[in-house]
Amino acid sequence: MGMARQDRLVAAMLALAVCLLLPVAARAQLRVGFYDTTCPNAEALVRQAVAAAFAKDAGIAAGLIRLHFHDCFVRGCDGSVLLSVNPGGGQTERDAAPNNPSLRGFDVIDAAKAAVESSCPGTVSCADIVAFAARDSIGLTGSVSYQVPAGRRDGRVSNASDTIDLPPPTSTAKNLTDLFAAKNLSVEDMVVLSGAHTVGRSFCNSFVKRVWNQSATPPAAIVDAGLSASYAALLRALCPSNTTQTTPITTAMDPGTPNVLDNNYYKLLPRGMGLFFSDNQLRVDTQMAALVAAFAANETLWKEKFAAAMVKMGRIQVQTGTCGEVRLNCSVVNPTSSAATIELLGSSAPAADEDGNGIAAS
Ligand code: HEM
Ligand SMILES: *[C@@H]1O[C@H](CO)[C@@H](O)[C@H](O)[C@H]1NC(C)=O
Ligand SMILES: *[C@@H]1O[C@H](CO)[C@@H](O)[C@H](O)[C@H]1NC(C)=O
Ligand SMILES: *[C@@H]1O[C@H](CO)[C@@H](O)[C@H](O)[C@H]1NC(C)=O
Ligand SMILES: *[C@@H]1O[C@H](CO)[C@@H](O)[C@H](O)[C@H]1NC(C)=O
Ligand SMILES: *[C@@H]1O[C@H](CO)[C@@H](O)[C@H](O)[C@H]1NC(C)=O
Ligand SMILES: *[C@@H]1O[C@H](CO)[C@@H](O)[C@H](O)[C@H]1NC(C)=O
Ligand SMILES: *[C@@H]1O[C@H](CO)[C@@H](O)[C@H](O)[C@H]1NC(C)=O
């Protein structure tokens, strides 16, 4: 307390540098029950917010599962996907093509955050709320339960160009292997996690090129390799040949049970009903195809592995301890002065500088 603004900023920058240099082994670890003493009802409040949204629109569960994936793959699970302002200027992750307009669930995270803030201010990170909400969505759609190690801190950077780490639906098997390996996830993890495509929907633009040749004049009907002709005809009837990123038409990825987390994804693939080029790649690669067959044959096996892989994904490049911050509003980073205070005190209370003038009151 009582430190000059300059000193506090320098200290905050030092803390940040130490965060990045500290070997992984020396960093604070994520822990189940992280909020047991500081905010005992945190997980229940998130669960209530997710359940309320799910009751109005069951599709939101898929959105929240994908939100956690897209958070973790870009700069680690740090809530950066939630930021609506790039503090450095320019586009955010949220603005980038893989996320806009398809990513959904932001309002549910905001509602959950409002609930935990009123119960225990400045304590629960947005990144942890995203991880809890994904787990709760998996529980609601798949009756799968698992514990979420928590203690993630929120990042202060969101840059659209970092979404290059997300696999596009045009990925080859090798692309998928490489992009997951870059996050220390195995081929098996990738095939297991892809089963999430048993819930939710996709905009036409992610698969239109598999059914329409948009470069021909006039556009010509085509059937991409591995796609069933009848499914292609259905998709072509749904999606106009002039589909672009903003065409507001969507289709369920598992048309039979779009809101049930079952192993249908793996059963649909061999029937030529994997929606994306990338989905079908899981049949082309022999190691991946063997896993697909195993998960199609045994749903229990897949669900066990899915829960474990979600926990593993939730550990990607997390910031813990005094690194990062506990964001007060999930859409914007904390004002710098309070961020410095937070990092200095190792606590979440920005109270020492409530008026935001950079001068602590005490
Ligand atoms: C393996 C590489 C993956 C690729 C190429 C991929 C690609 C996509 C694409 C293109 C969409 C549709 C976006 C749109 O609306 O246009 C989508 C939706 C979705 N993805 Fe993936 N994805 C992958 C892995 C994952 C993983 C690891 C998860 C979660 C564990 C996941 C969960 C979902 C969910 C739940 C949806 C539906 C979202 C909604 O209904 O709002 N995906 N994915
Ligand atoms: C975003 O990332 C790109 C590529 O690394 C970089 O050139 C750019 O300066 C970054 N923008 C901001 C605002 O950080
Ligand atoms: C996929 O692999 C091809 C061929 O190796 C490469 O040119 C392309 O950049 C890769 N795409 C992604 C998204 O990694
Ligand atoms: C992957 O693991 C290596 C070795 O432990 C580590 O240096 C690297 O930071 C990890 N990468 C990610 C994205 O977690
Ligand atoms: C699409 O049409 C163009 C122009 O007729 C042709 O050159 C190209 O080979 C076609 N592509 C596919 C995938 O059929
Ligand atoms: C796309 O094609 C439909 C007819 O299939 C037409 O009604 C619509 O105006 C076209 N949209 C654009 C953006 O060209
Ligand atoms: C399915 O997987 C579960 C979980 O690994 C296992 O206990 C069970 O024996 C498997 N069932 C069959 C029919 O292989
Ligand atoms: C959070 O920040 C956003 C963007 O500035 C703003 O629109 C929203 O009202 C804020 N939410 C709260 C609860 O203050």
Image (tube, rainbow, N blue to C red):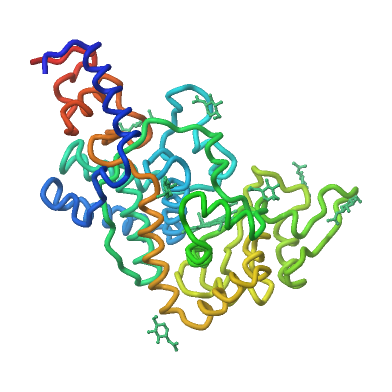
Residue at (46%, 27%) from the top-left corner?
A: 86
Q: Give the mark count.
A: 0
Q: Quadrant of the N terminus?
A: top left
Q: Nearer the viewer, residue 73 or 40?
A: 73
Residue at (32%, 41%) from the top-left corner?
A: 23
Quarter-of-image position of residue 213 = bottom right
Q: Is residue 252 above or below residue 293?
A: above
Horizontal side of residue 66 vs 255, given as left or right: left
Q: Is residue 126 above or below residue 8?
A: below
The x and y percentages for residue 357 are 23, 12
Q: Quadrant of the C terminus?
A: top left
The x and y percentages for residue 320 are 27, 41
Which residue of the protein is positioned furthest toward the left in this rendering?
Answer: 362
Quarter-of-image position of residue 126 = top left
Residue at (62%, 50%) from the top-left corner?
A: 168
The x and y percentages for residue 34 are 19, 51
The x and y percentages for residue 214 are 81, 49
Horizontal side of residue 20 vs 150, given as left or right: right
Which residue of the protein is positioned furthest toward the right in this rendering?
Answer: 217
Horizontal side of residue 55 vs 207, given as left or right: left
Residue at (26%, 51%) from the top-left corner?
A: 30
